[in-house]
């Protein structure tokens, strides 16, 4: 049977990680994989998470299964974190999932189950895993213009023109904040225009929010998701705890289905739990428990927020520094967008050949589409990157 299997395309980012590892140069710089790193190049365990682990170790008395939806205290805490008081709790169905990816996958499954004709509109570009999961599930995708490589901002007119092609029942996948891979985000009024368009047509928004707290702060980063949740009749929200709690390998995420019609709650909750059961039964608990302990303890929550702010401000400082260096070296504001972008990534708008030269000649590793992980830099490597960009003639 296995002879019928076809080789799967290699994951480009994982291949890049390997190439970086194999590079013997001492001054190589890794701006590839999407993991936060501190100035020492370490992905730390956050203080509050470590302490939550200690406390939970003392308290935990059993490893028996949780519920299919995971621990309700986790859902409550995450719904509060993401949605604030934008919608009443009894309008939100939710299940814990293995990472944000698990939530994305379950959301697509639910869409396909509810409406096999639904097409999913995705930004060009988007996180590549969105496209590969949609393809795997046989869901038709339509891409909408998003990134303007001339300005480094959002091509909002192009986006709206493409979204005008939506049909009732189609789904629009939107990044709640800190767009991956571009770093370019919609403004508040632009979000309102998208909400109005989706409502006019009868399209359903799906929000993927994987970097809350990495952009303008926990509350500001959730503002768009909250506006959609309170402004549209129905919305699916896939949230990841990997980045903002630094618990990547614990596989912690949540899928929420919000409906203005409270009567939908029982059926959506039942379907989310059903999908967990079909795909992996009970979701992993450890990471979700740590999140729940942190968010439900005043002291740990305050410490977590403080550390997250340090992380966010560190990335903002690197953005400012890189954009200033490039302004000095190019005598232009061509790379000013780097300081405007938010989150862990920026797409620089370099050609694949230039990206390749940066790797070969300077040991600087970035994704082929010129996405850099800002957190892969520190204040000493920023000038090196700026110099190299100018040297390769970008
Ligand atoms: N959505 C987006 C846009 C992401 O960038 C990521 C992480 N790379 C995820 C979802 C999911 O992350 P995880 O499964 O590790 O929680």
Image: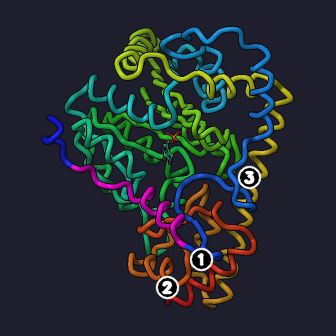
In the image, residue 25 above or below residue 10: below
Q: Is residue 59 left or right of residue 345?
A: right
Q: Are marks 1 and 2 in contact (CB under 8 Å)?
A: no
Q: CA distance from mark 3 to mark 2?
A: 29 Å
* Disc 1 CB within 8 Å of nearest ligand 1 atom: no
Q: Is residue 16 left or right of residue 244?
A: left
Point out which mark residue 25 bears. 1
Q: Is residue 334 left or right of residue 383?
A: left
Residue 14 sits inside the magenta stretch? yes
Residue at 37% x, 14% y: name it.
274
Circle nearer the viewer, 1 or 2: 1
Q: Is residue 224 left or right of residue 172?
A: right
Residue 59 sits inside the magenta stretch? no
Residue with the mark numbered 2: 394
Say which quarter of the image contains residue 313: bottom right
The answer to which of 121 and 29 lies nearer the viewer is 29
Query: Which color scheme did the rendering employ for the protein?
Result: rainbow
* Residue 83 seen by the camera: yes
In the image, residue 63 above or below residue 243: above
The answer to which of 341 and 322 lies nearer the viewer is 322
Q: CA distance from mark 1 to mark 3?
A: 28 Å
Q: Where residue 36 appears, x then y in whole percent? A: 64, 53
Q: Secondary structure at mark 2?
A: loop
Point out which mark residue 119 bears. none
Q: Secondary structure at mark 1?
A: loop
The answer to which of 35 and 326 lies nearer the viewer is 35
The answer to which of 375 and 342 lies nearer the viewer is 375
Q: Where residue 27 appears, x then y in whole percent? A: 65, 76
For the stretch drawn in magenta, the main secondary structure is helix
Give the mark nearer the N terminus: 1 vs 2: 1
Residue with the mark numbered 3: 311
The residue segment tinted magenta is: 7-23
């Amino acid at each position: 049977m296995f002879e019928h299997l076809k080789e799967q395309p290699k994951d480009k980012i994982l291949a890049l990680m390997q190439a970086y590892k194999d590079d013997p140069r001492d001054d190589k710089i890794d701006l590839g994989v999407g993991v936060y790193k501190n100035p020492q190049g370490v992905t730390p365990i956050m203080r509050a998470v470590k302490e939550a682990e200690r406390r939970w170790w003392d308290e935990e008395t059993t490893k028996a299964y949780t519920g299919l939806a995971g621990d309700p205290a986790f859902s409550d805490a995450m719904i509060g974190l993401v949605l604030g008081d934008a919608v009443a709790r009894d309008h939100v169905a939710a299940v814990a999932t293995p990472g944000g990816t698990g939530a994305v996958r379950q959301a697509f499954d639910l869409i396909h189950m509810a409406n096999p004709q639904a097409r999913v509109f995705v930004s060009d570009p988007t996180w590549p895993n969105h496209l590969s999961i949609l393809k795997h599930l046989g869901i038709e995708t339509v891409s909408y213009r998003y990134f303007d490589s001339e300005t480094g901002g959002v091509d909002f007119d192009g986006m709206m023109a493409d979204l005008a092609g939506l049909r009732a029942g189609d789904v629009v996948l939107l990044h709640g904040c800190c767009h991956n891979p571009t770093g370019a985000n919609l403004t508040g009024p632009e979000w309102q225009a998208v909400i109005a368009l989706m409502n006019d047509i009868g399209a359903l928004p799906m929000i993927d929010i994987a970097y809350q707290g990495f952009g303008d702060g926990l509350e500001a980063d959730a503002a768009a998701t909250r506006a959609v949740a309170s402004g549209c009749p129905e919305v699916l929200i896939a949230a990841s705890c990997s980045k903002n709690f630094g618990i990547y390998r614990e596989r912690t995420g949540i899928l929420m289905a919000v409906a203005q019609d409270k009567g939908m709650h029982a059926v959506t909750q039942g379907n989310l739990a059903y999908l967990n059961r079909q795909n992996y039964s009970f979701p992993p608990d450890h990471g979700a428990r740590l999140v729940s302990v942190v968010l439900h303890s005043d002291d740990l929550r305050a410490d977590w927020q403080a550390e997250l702010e340090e992380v966010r401000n560190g990335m903002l400082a690197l953005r400012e520094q890189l954009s200033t260096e490039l302004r000095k070296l190019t005598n232009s504001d061509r790379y000013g967008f780097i300081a405007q972008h938010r989150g862990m990534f920026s797409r620089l708008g370099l050609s694949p050949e230039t990206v390749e030269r940066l790797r070969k000649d300077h040991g600087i590793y970035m994704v082929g589409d010129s996405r850099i992980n800002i957190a892969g830099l520190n204040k000493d490597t920023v000038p090196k990157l700026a110099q190299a960009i100018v040297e390769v003639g970008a």
